[in-house]
Image (cartoon, rainbow, N blue to C red):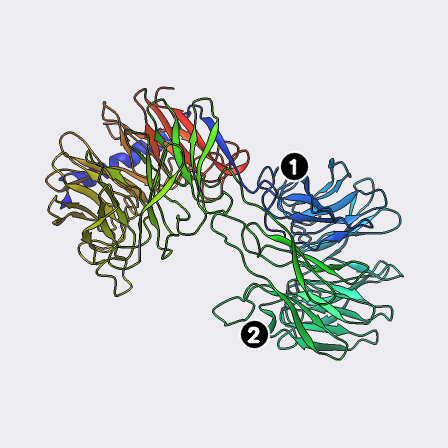
Amino acid sequence: MRFKDGAWSRVVGVYLTFVFAAAAQPPAETVIHSFRYFPQGAAPYATLIRDESGNLYGTTNQGGAYAAGAVFVLAPSGAYTVLYSFTGGSDGAHPYAGLIRDSAGNLYGTTFQGGSAGAGVVYKLTPAGQETVLYTFSGGVDGANPYAGVISDPAGNLYGTATAGGKSNAGVVYKVDPSGTETVLYSFTGGADGANPYAGLIADPSGNLYGTTRGGGQASSGVLYKLNMSTGQTVLHSFGPPSGETPMAGVIRDPEGNLFGTATTVIYKFSANGHYSVLHDLPVGLTGGPASAGVIRDNQGNLYGTTDPVVGPIPSYSPFGAVYKLNTVGFLTALYSFPGAPQSGGAATGPNGGLVFDPFGNLYGATPYGGIGGMLYQVDAAGHPQSLYSLPAAQNGTTPRAPVTVGPAGEIYGTTTAGGAANAGIVYKIQADGQQTVLYTFSGGDDGAYPQAGVALDSSGNIYGTTQSGGAANQGVVYKLTPAGQEAVLHSFTGGVDGANPFGGVILDSSGNIYGTTFSGGAASRTGLPEGVVFKLDPSGNESLLYSFTGLADGGAPAAGVILDSTGNLYGTTVYGGFGFGVVFSISAAGQESVLYSFTGEADGGNPYAGLIRDSSGNLYGTNVNFGFGGGGVVFRLSSLGDLDVLYSFSAGAGGNSPFSGVVRDTAGNLYGTADYGGNSGCLFGCGVVYQITPSRQELILYSFTGQADGGNPVAGVTLDAGGNLYGTAGQDGAAGGGVVYHVSTNP
């Protein structure tokens, strides 16, 4: 249970080989299938607008055809149409802002990202959905990352703010004329005049502009300002606790010239005579968390707005925010509490949008906390809520995080962690021509939810797998699917002695018995340590507990499944336990566990999330996601005598790092796998690679993901067919944003 003699010198040699090999030109990858990520959009953060026919227009920050956000319209009939899907390129990406509409029906807005510099754009969209980029921010003195939308004047000029950029990188107020020429009207210094305006603008009859900044000011908590085109900027109020701070939203103005807005935890008024007052606090127990959105005002002077979810472990009757009303005598009422939404693999959390009226006093808004990817809702004048439209998940699945299984006819089977009608994942089959069939959609209930593992096939074409949650106790299940897609839950974990949360898949023996692991639970589950079990199910689903980890020297938290040798011994890994960095273990047919190796978290690596393979001599091969000589994980071989040999040590850079998946081996002794990060380009920490380790310990990069149409972050590893082809999944990106199934040849 130690390093094999000479292993330290081998590690050094491998590192030098890595520097040479990373420069090799990778072969091409073939995308077999692209999963769609919320094709109708997801995470609507912006305030809606309403036209004279009752149509509602808005944006989603995520989803759409390219997972970069969308512009949509909801008709009074309930018909929902995506008018435009941002590609994430020069046309913009991820709008936080809402829209304005001109008399011809054209829409105008901003995106926070995208554009040629990645700093956002101002765009125009015709009623037919044709986009024109009016201005692209460079990220320099002209501004960067507009969070808010625009307003217009009678001449067609657009006015807005950008949160960053400018002379001091503290944001700007800008104007874009009809020809697309931008003028910076004011550049914030980050001092007493404010910094980082997240809020948009309003104008008074004289053309003065009003807005807020989130930072700067006397207390570094933001300012309320006025901008006169002739005399410049005037700070009307500097925010600071306890009377409001860091406003995300702008202001509205009544006919008398009074301004109203929100500043995180308060609703405030700035009177026409220059007096600032807090109209009401926003109490956690009544309305939820802070307010990112501003207020609107009815003809009687009542104010309406929304709050966001509670931040932190604070009890609340409305953890996902609320719609509130503040009447003219200062009484605050919660009209509607947002219900929340499942978020696994789905839309990111974010702010609730503001509100808009119709002529009858009904309120309309958008929230990411409802339905699957968010929802559009109405609250009538009497305070009764109604869901108008729930943004659906991707019916055909999204976010594949599991390895694939290649069937006897070359068809590919696998799972997605999200997508399906309940956004709880699916089981799919892809034919050789790329045609996908959804074999089963998980409901998120007793049948299971969020499968992280791949599937196993028996000789009759039945499919077996696990889900990490769902089931009778919401602790995961082992399931069986017939070739026709009929599911049977073979075992529903209770979270007790039988285990909980199986992350790894299952294997079958010749008698139809099923073997697997759970990440937590077990007989020793008592201390909060990562424990877990190894289990066996007979063909009828009766469970036998083969071993229960303690989380101590014997290991804990097996994230991967097990393999079986010809004498009935099982082999696997745990993420933790041993010396603290995981172990390689065996379990005999009689249920006796042996720790074959305990990782030290040094040059031998640590935290093996992946399972093992075994050669004809009894050597075991696997990966560690962390540590090693280069700090980015290792590929190792463990002999039948317990000697560990580091075959390759990853380091940050083009060669990849963080191999969460294991390896496969061909008849010549080459090993193949994926690293979740690193590679040549595309992502903040690299988009990952497919690699080969030769018998001489040289790493060859077979493919480096870009995070574009080819996918990114291949956490699942690869499957090798008899022809030397590698198949795998990349859980992120792809042409439609929901990940891909890909093929890379080992013989380019």
In the rendered image, the residue lying farthest to the bottom is 329
Badge 2 or badge 1: first in the primary sequence: 1
| Location of residue 206 with respect to 153 vertically, above or below | below
Helix, strand or loop under label 2: helix
Q: Is residue 115 left or right of residue 18?
A: right
Label 1 Cα crowd, 10 Å radius (few <14 / some 14-19 / many 20+) = some
Residue in the image at 20% along x and 58% along y: 552
Q: Give the image location of residue 265, x and y in percent.
A: 62, 71
Viewer-nearest of discs 2 and 1: 2
Identify residue for label 2.
Answer: 285
| Location of residue 264 with respect to 463 vertically, above or below | below
Residue 290, by quadrant, is: bottom right
Helix, strand or loop under label 1: loop
For residue 606, say whether it is visible. Answer: no
Identify residue for label 1.
Answer: 90
Q: Distance between the residues labelled 2 and 1?
A: 44 Å
Q: Give the image location of residue 330, x and y in percent.
A: 72, 79
Residue in the image at 28% along x and 41% along y: 506
